[in-house]
Amino acid sequence: MTKRQEKAQVTRRKLIDTGLDLLKEKGFEAVNVEDITKAAGVSKGTFYTYFKRKEDIVYEISRAPFADIIHEIDSMKDKPLINRLTHYFRRFMERVEFAGVYVCRQWIRDVLDPKNVPDNKDGSKLSFDVEMLKNILSSAVENNDLSQDTPVETLTYIIISTLYGMMTLWCMSDKEFEPLDWIDRFASVELLEIIRPYK
C-alpha cells in the first residue's frame, strides 16, 4: 500500500469515527455532513471523495464491524457450538450498543421496508446477518456438532428473530432493556433448548 493510499484510509476512517461519535451524541437528524467534516478537520469536498451522503456512514457502521465477528467465530472451531453462538450474540450486541441507540434506530428505519430502501441504504443487512448465522450452523452440521437432520434455516430464523428482538427492545426502551445482560440467560435457557434436539 502506498503512502497516499494509507493516508486515504486514515482519512476515511477518521470520517467514519467522527460521524459515529456525532450520531451517537446528537442523533441522525441533528447531524449533517458539514458537522462531520468540521469535527474531523477536513473539507466538505473530502467527505464526498469517500461518501455520497451521511447515510453511507450508517451503512459502514452497520456492516463492516459485523464481518469481523465471523472471523472470530472461525477461529473458535474447537469450542462448543453454544460458546460460538453466545460469542456471536455478545459481539453482535456489543457492536450495536457501541454504535449507539440513535444509529440503531436510524438503521431500523432505513431497512424496515426492504423493497423501498434507496440505493444508499443497507436494505440487505438482514440477508447478510441470516447468511452469517446460517454459515455458523451449517459449519456445525459439517463438523458433526449438530446432526445431519438439523433444520438449519429454521433455527437461523428463530435465533435471528431473538437477536433482532433484543436490538429493537433496546431501542424501544430507550436503552433500559440491556441486551448484554440477557445474552447469557438466553444462551443458557432458550438457545440451549433450541439446539439440544440436534446434538
Image (cartoon, rainbow, N blue to C red):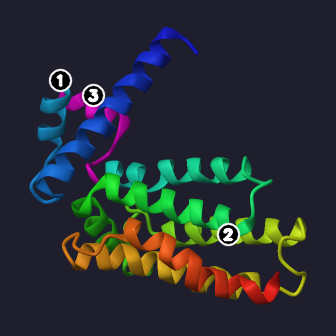
Mark 3 or 2: the one toward you: 2
Q: Residue at x 66, y 87 (%)?
A: 193
Q: Is residue 194 left or right of residue 100?
A: right
Q: Nearer the viewer, residue 155 or 26?
A: 155
Q: Nearer the viewer, residue 107 or 93?
A: 93
Q: Quadrant of the N terminus?
A: top right
Q: Earlier in the sequence, mark 3 or mark 2?
A: 3
The boundaries of the magenta stretch are 42-55
Q: Residue at x 50, y 83 (%)?
A: 161
- Residue behind mark 2: 82
From mark 2 to mark 1, how far is it between C-alphas?
45 Å
- Residue behind mark 3: 46
What numbered label is drawn on residue 41?
1
Q: Residues within 10 Å of mark 2 (few under 14, many from 20)?
A: some
* Residue 117 seen by the camera: no
Question: Marks 3 and 2: CB-CB under 8 Å?
Answer: no
Amino acid type of the residue tagged 2 in the rendering: Ile
Q: Residue at x 42, y 74 (%)?
A: 182
Q: Is residue 140 left or right of residue 48?
A: right
Mark 2 or 1: the one toward you: 2
Q: Earlier in the sequence, mark 1 or mark 3?
A: 1
Amino acid type of the residue tagged 1 in the rendering: Gly
Q: Earlier in the sequence, mark 2 or mark 1?
A: 1
Give the secondary structure at mark 1: loop
Q: Quadrant of residue 170?
A: bottom left
Amino acid type of the residue tagged 3 in the rendering: Thr
From mark 1 to mark 3, how far is it between C-alphas?
10 Å
Q: Residues within 10 Å of mark 1 (few under 14, many from 20)?
A: few
Mark 1 or 3: the one toward you: 1
Indicate whether residue 146 is drawn in magenta. no
Q: Is residue 194 left or right of residue 91?
A: right
Q: Is residue 152 left or right of residue 146?
A: left
